[in-house]
Amino acid sequence: MSGRPVLVKPGLPHPLPGAVGLSHLSAYDWEAADGVCGGSPHLHLVCTEAYVVTGGRGAVQTLSPDGYREIPLEPGSIAWFAPGTVHRMVQGGDLRITVLMQNSGLPEAGDAVFTFPPEVLADPSRYAEAAGLPPGTGPETAAAARRRRDLAVEGYLGLREALVAGDNGPYREFQRAAARLVRDKVPTWRELWRTGALATAERTGAQLDALAAGEPSYLGEATAHEAAPTRLGGFGMCGRRDEYNLPGTTLPYGGE
């Protein structure tokens, strides 16, 4: 054994810094039952999500153990939410954001759960039917995305009303129901994390070891990469989404 540090190759080809996910969103301008225009409330089970506002105005409404909040969004502002935080993007006028998502690939692999009413969450097949969309970006997909949004808002308003009244029971039960829905997906998520975010962090450790040993030969692999959105105007949870067909960036491994 030479004792030289062994560099860990990234499991993903050319991941973005930190193996983050990336997409661009224009918030929906569809009016919901409460008169508010915006996206589908949901939470993530293991991913922190960040909004970087690039244009327009709006807000993000959140439900968490510290209660209900409405965070203003304007160009240059950033908001982010830890796993378990219910969030709803609200349109205030031409709101556009760049989304940075922890744990490359996991949100598209089912890490996000909509705030559908309890009876939908209790039935995995019914949940899957309500959450799914037809392929493409045409009128049929738009109508399905709006129905999905309206159903998520229906459940969300009940959670918010209870939380504002000081009752966090429905919110906690929603978190538990979301966890039950995704439990069978954990082995797949673990592999995505292992070959994405974890592999990237381990590679940094190996690079530090190499530098400490005075053997920076890995720098000989230096290069640059570029990409542009390859699908424009897709229907995301919060709005129309521009996506990158790069593993771990927006689409699931293997694409769609």
Image (spheres, helix red, strand yellow):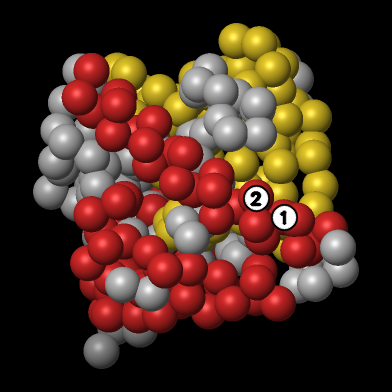
Q: Tell me if 68 is positioned left or right of 249 in this view.
A: right
- Answer above or below: position of 107 versus 125: above
Which corner quadrant of the image does residue 67 belong to? bottom right
- Does residue 158 appear in this view? yes
The residue that label 1 is drawn on is: 160
Task: Spot the residue most to the bottom.
Answer: 1
- Answer above or below: position of 215 versus 23: below
Taking the spot 28% from the left edge, 70% from the top edge, the residue there is 124
Q: Are marks 1 and 2 in contact (CB under 8 Å)?
A: yes
Residue 194 location, x and y as percent? Answer: 33, 71
Which corner quadrant of the image does residue 7 belong to? bottom left
Taking the spot 16% from the left edge, 36% from the top edge, the residue there is 134
The residue that label 2 is drawn on is: 157
Amino acid at the residue labelled 2: Leu
- Could you classify mark 2 by the number of other residues whose Cα lies within 10 Å: few (under 14), some (14-19), or many (20 or more)? some
Q: Nearer the viewer, residue 127 or 48?
A: 127
Amino acid at the residue labelled 1: Arg
Q: Tell me if 64 is positioned left or right of 216 in this view.
A: right
Q: Say which element carries label 2.
A: helix
Residue 132 location, x and y as percent? Answer: 24, 47
Taking the spot 66% from the left edge, 69% from the top edge, the residue there is 171
Q: Nearer the viewer, residue 55 or 245?
A: 55
